[in-house]
Amino acid sequence: MGGGALRRTRAVVVLAASVVGGVALVLPAVRYTTAKFPDGVPSPDLSLALRLVCAAALAAAVALGWVALKRRSDEVLAFATLPALIVVGIAVRYLVRTLPGLADLFPAAAIAPGLGAWVLLGVGVLLTLTGLASGFAVKRG
């Protein structure tokens, strides 16, 4: 596989992962029993503000993937690491800090991470690895 084919593959991976990440944003980030929550307690799901930040980061990754395909350049694709780190940071903070804290406050609600949180974390890691691979390809070439 030549350098151009690897570049196209990395760009397509960034585009596809960003679309999957967008789908993950509409999936629930937490599984819980709402009947066991006291009245007036906000939902433990990923907040709208964090979803919008992730959506903006994923849109930036889509733009970088598209530009990388058009310019046939790995330099642009290496910048996909930056929005990916934003997505990973939000997902990790949510999974490590928010969910255990809520589970401690409301143990009867059976709070557990949902599919959306895991998919978002996986997308962020995949985008980070792809961006780093592009950066290393630029440095080698």
Image (tube, rainbow, N blue to C red):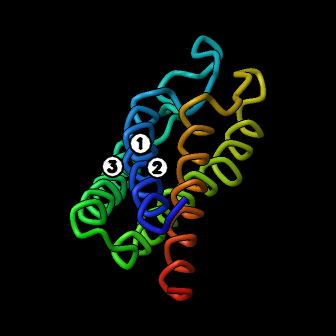
Picture coordinates of residue 49, whole percent (x, y): 34, 50
For this orientation, the residue located farthest to the front is 2
Q: Tag count in the figure? A: 3
Q: Earlier in the sequence, mark 3 or mark 2?
A: 2
Q: Residue at 44% of width from left, 37% of height from top?
A: 20
Occupied quadrant, residue 77: bottom left
Identify residue for label 2: 13
Task: Evaluate if marks 2 and 1 touch, with contact meaning CB atoms under 8 Å apart.
Answer: yes
Q: Which residue is mark 1?
A: 16
Say what amino acid the circle numbered 2 marks: Val
Figure check: 61 above or below 120: below
Q: Nearer the viewer, mark 3 or mark 2?
A: 2
Q: Give the residue number, with chain letter if any, for mark 3.
A: 55
| x, y percent for residue 24 | 46, 34
Looking at the rendered structure, the kind of residue marked 1 is Ala
- Crowd band around label 2 with a 10 angstrom C-alpha radius: few (<14), some (14–19), many (20+): some
Residue 22: x percent and y percent?
37, 39
**Percent x, y of residue 19:** 37, 40
